Image: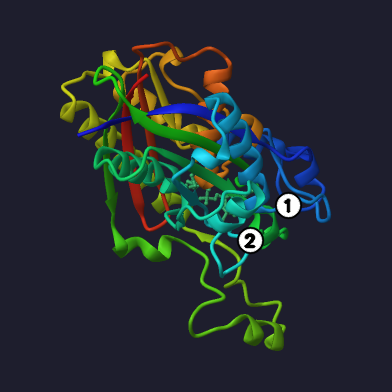
Amino acid sequence: MYNSKIVGLGKYLPDNIVTNKDLENKIDTSNEWIVERTGIKERRHIVKGDGNTTASMGAKAAKIALENANMSAYEIDLILFATLSPDYYMPGSGVFVQNILNIPTCPAMDIRNACSGFVYGVATADQFIKTGMYKNILVIGSETQSGAIDMTTRGRDIAVIFGDGAGAAVVSRNESKESGILSSHLHSQGEHVDSLVMKAPNTNKWVTEIVNENNPEDSSYYPYMNGKMVFKNAVLRFEEVINEGLIYNNLQTEDIDLLIPHQANLRISQFIQRKLNLRDDQVYNNIMRYGNTTAASIPIALTEAWEEGRLSEGNILVLAAFGAGFSWGSTIIKW
Ligand code: COA
């Protein structure tokens, strides 16, 4: 059985910074409320006409990841694209990246696990490499949340949290058994589908119907979040799935060199840190600058941590995510 490892990382954030003050001017909220409840100070939003889409941002991050891996796009055997905000309903976003990067005919598939999408992607890549089927896999997380946000007071709980951006990793076959992806642990719980959800368009309510109805009262095509329910479940599942990965690998919390939690909310990260008794230097957070970029948050944070020199050979790195579904997961890596 082969082993896999991350050999290249990249990120792309749109230039347009939206501060809490900017939001104060649009909706009934305040910098104090946002910082106290979420830790977020600013986030990025694409601007209509700036050429950015979920797929093009993903391709930009992927290009940098390939350069850092010293690899040409032709060497990629599989593209895995995690997003909840694809360019189109059909086809998926992976094939757009394939087209932008001029990769001829490798398979491309999308992963629709919202905030857990990148962890699901890394786990999938690891399995394809372990079986020997593929050697080099691009795993991308990219999101354009800004286009689907209700920028009125009705949508303020969502509007202040989410941001746009992309991150990517090249996962490759690793000849050494001493390092690489040790294990992944994935879960979902469909009974909570309604707690974090965007209900339209859907199979019973097509886009044409929504347009024809033109009903401003209808908020079903904006994301809905039961914030308290999400918070309660997130802190529970994050802790559980991190411990599951540690136990599986015979590791203790003291062995963690860096935990990169999905950047859902700074209070959630701080809660997990306290519960696991981790020092500040063991946990990476950048939600203050980018907000919650769902599937893109872990690869953006991972790239940034790597750029800052926070990862050295032999380090134990833990990725953990929780999001809509609910679905959650962890990946334990020896760097
Ligand atoms: N600005 C100002 N006030 C706001 C607001 C905003 N952006 N959003 C909501 N409020 C108001 C509410 O309307 C409510 O007012 P009321 O008391 O008059 O009814 C009040 O603030 C408290 O709202 P509540 O929803 O109870 O706040 P909360 O303490 O649960 O915090 C979240 C809200 C969303 C920050 C919190 O629930 C949370 O962090 N949940 C997890 C979210 C998350 O991580 N999502 C990503 C999952 S991947």
Identify the residue shown where x is 28% and y is 19%. Answer: 176
**Is 13 displayed left or right of 143 in the figure?**
right
Answer yes or no: is residue 35 visible.
Answer: no
Q: What is the secondary structure assignment of the residue under circle 2?
A: loop
Please give the residue where the numbered disc 1 appears in the rendered image. Answer: 28
**Place of residue 2 in the rendered image (x, y in percent of width and height, measured from the top left):** 25, 32
Total number of numbered discs in the rendering: 2
- Mark 2 or mark 1: name the one nearer the start of the chain: 1
Identify the residue shown where x is 58% and y is 39%. Answer: 62
**Place of residue 310 in the rendered image (x, y in percent of width and height, measured from the top left):** 49, 14
Q: Measure the C-alpha gap from mark 2 to mark 1.
A: 30 Å
Q: Is residue 280 above or below residue 94?
A: above
* Label 2, residues with CA under 10 Å away: few <14, some 14-19, many ≥20: some
**Is 102 displayed left or right of 191 in the figure?**
right
**Place of residue 82 in the rendered image (x, y in percent of width and height, measured from the top left):** 49, 50
Please give the residue where the numbered disc 2 appears in the rendered image. Answer: 87
Identify the residue shown where x is 46% and y is 49%. Answer: 80
Quadrant of the image occupied by residue 33: top right
**Nearer-the-camera pick, 41 or 296:** 296
